[in-house]
Image (tube, rainbow, N blue to C red):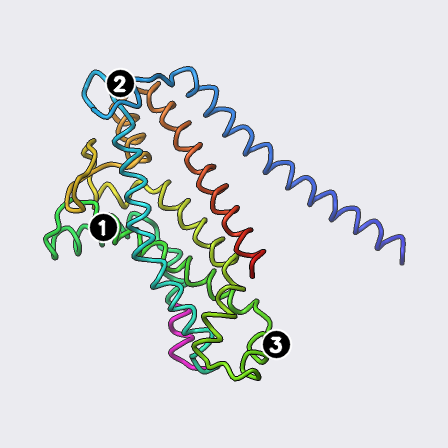
Amino acid sequence: MRGKIKVSERFMASITWAAAGITLCALLFLVGFILVKGIPHLKPSLFSLTYNSENVSLMPALISTVIMTLMALIIAVPLGVFSAIYLTEYARRGNKAVGLVRVTTETLSGIPSIVYGLFGLLFFVTALGWGFSMLAGAFTLSIMILPLIIRSSEEALKAVPDTYREGAFGLGAGKLRTVFRIVLPSAMPGILAGIILAVGRIVGETAALIYTAGTVAQIPVSPMQSARTLSVHMYALSREGLHMDEGYATAVVLLLVVVLINAVSARIAKRIGGKA
């Protein structure tokens, strides 16, 4: 009997190591391919503030990506975190409305991005009259990432031990003070992990932004102006087929931006977690 258990354990361990190895190889292949194809074509002209037919600069798209990310997070993070606080701390357990909200949230997280793009086109661009603009794109992206932020924040709040709440109540703290002074700081690392995933989806999104923010290669000076992000910039260059080398170089910059954002966010989460 023990021999059979050892064989099964070795078999499962080998499958686990094989899956991890395949995943790592796929990641290294993708990153290596992007770096090999893109690094030789990185040049100072790509970082010019002016985009034209002779110099397809990625700097306007890079600036638009940063602005779009901040706008979407400003809209989605407060809504998502406060919704999770209500579902976890204030809603009654077994409430049918809470169950409906959770089912709806999980359903929204599985909808393809092209559907969000069409919704943004019909509602924000056409019905509200915003046109192709950064604001329409930011609201569409905020709806896309809202389920992810709600679910991750909810799980982070649930992971906080009930003894923290009971101790705060025992010392005379009210519900609101307990949530914002005790529970929320303790759950902040998990909440930031969800925000990091949301940032990754924002930076890599293309379909939804083509229908809402447009593809104009310019540095926006107003939220009502059209602009393109780095992912949309890559798509436009590859669709035209005239600047594939610059498209690979843009992919390298996009990869570095994602890695930098994740590193900074992880460092912030670690510091907040240490203080908590």
- Describe residue 216's horizontal placement relative to residue 1 as left or right: left
Residue to which mark 1 is pinned = 118
Residue on which disc 2 sits: 242
The answer to if 20 sits in the magenta stretch is: no
| Residue 233 position in % (x across, y down) | 28, 31
- Amino acid type shown at disc 2: Leu
Q: How would you classify the magenta stretch by its main secondary structure?
A: helix
Q: Quadrant of residue 164?
A: bottom right
Residue located at (25% from left, 22% from top): 56
Rendered view: 170 above or below 184? below
Of the 4 image quadrants, the one containing the N terminus is bottom right
Residue 97 drawn in magenta: yes
Q: CA distance from mark 2 to mark 1?
A: 28 Å
Badge 3 density bin: few <14, some 14–19, many ≥20, Cα 10 Å: few
Q: Give the residue type at disc 1.
A: Leu
Mark 1 or 3: the one toward you: 3
Label 1, label 3: how far apart the Cα atoms are: 46 Å
Residue assigned mark 3: 163
Q: Nearer the viewer, residue 135 or 101?
A: 135
Q: SS class of the residue under badge 2?
A: loop
Q: Earlier in the sequence, mark 1 or mark 3?
A: 1
Residue 109 image offset from top left, x and y in percent: 39, 57
